[in-house]
Amino acid sequence: MKTIGLKVFVTMTAIAVVFLLALSAQAQNASETLYKAKCATCHGADGTGSAMGTKMGAHDLSTALVQGMSDTELTDIITNGKGKMPKYGASLKPEDIKGLVAHIRTFKK
């Protein structure tokens, strides 16, 4: 009887882990898609800056300067804009902005 209970527990735990990993991958894909739609034009697909963005002074998101900023600082910049960067607080949900910050972290050198 205990063996059956353990097997059920192990199976349910494995299913939960797979489900959570799938949700995490979907969130990352959604953030990457949003980044490509809203940010890549200036910051480049890899975060180092597009030709147009470089001319406009867009920051290389992979640098120590940007990567050293707190999540709160990056959230504030995305939400309220900075310099020539437009503000996205009115057009993006807070969870979308949080996802963008997480995606920016993937550019760390």
Image (spheres, rainbow, N blue to C red):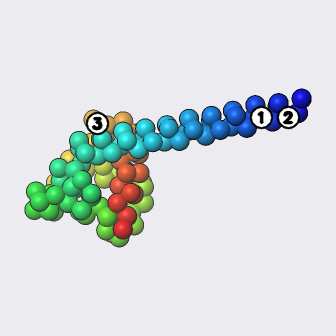
Eyeballing the image, is 1 above or below 28?
above
Query: Could you say which quadrant of the image residue 73 lies in?
Result: bottom left
* Residue at image location 21% in from the left, 55% down from the top: 44
Answer with left or right where residue 44 lies relative to residue 107.
left
- Amino acid at the residue labelled 2: Thr
Residue 90 image label: 3
* Residue at image location 10% in from the left, 57% down from the top: 52
Asked if disc 1 and disc 2 are in contact, CB closer than 8 Å, the reply is: yes
Residue 3 image label: 2
Mark closer to the chain start, 3 or 2:
2
Answer with left or right where residue 101 lies relative to residue 49.
right
Secondary structure of the residue carrying tag 1 is helix
- Amino acid at the residue labelled 3: Ala
Q: Residue furthest right?
A: 1
Secondary structure of the residue carrying tag 2 is helix
Asked if disc 3 and disc 1 are in contact, CB closer than 8 Å, the reply is: no
- Amino acid at the residue labelled 1: Lys
Q: Mark 1 = which residue?
A: 7
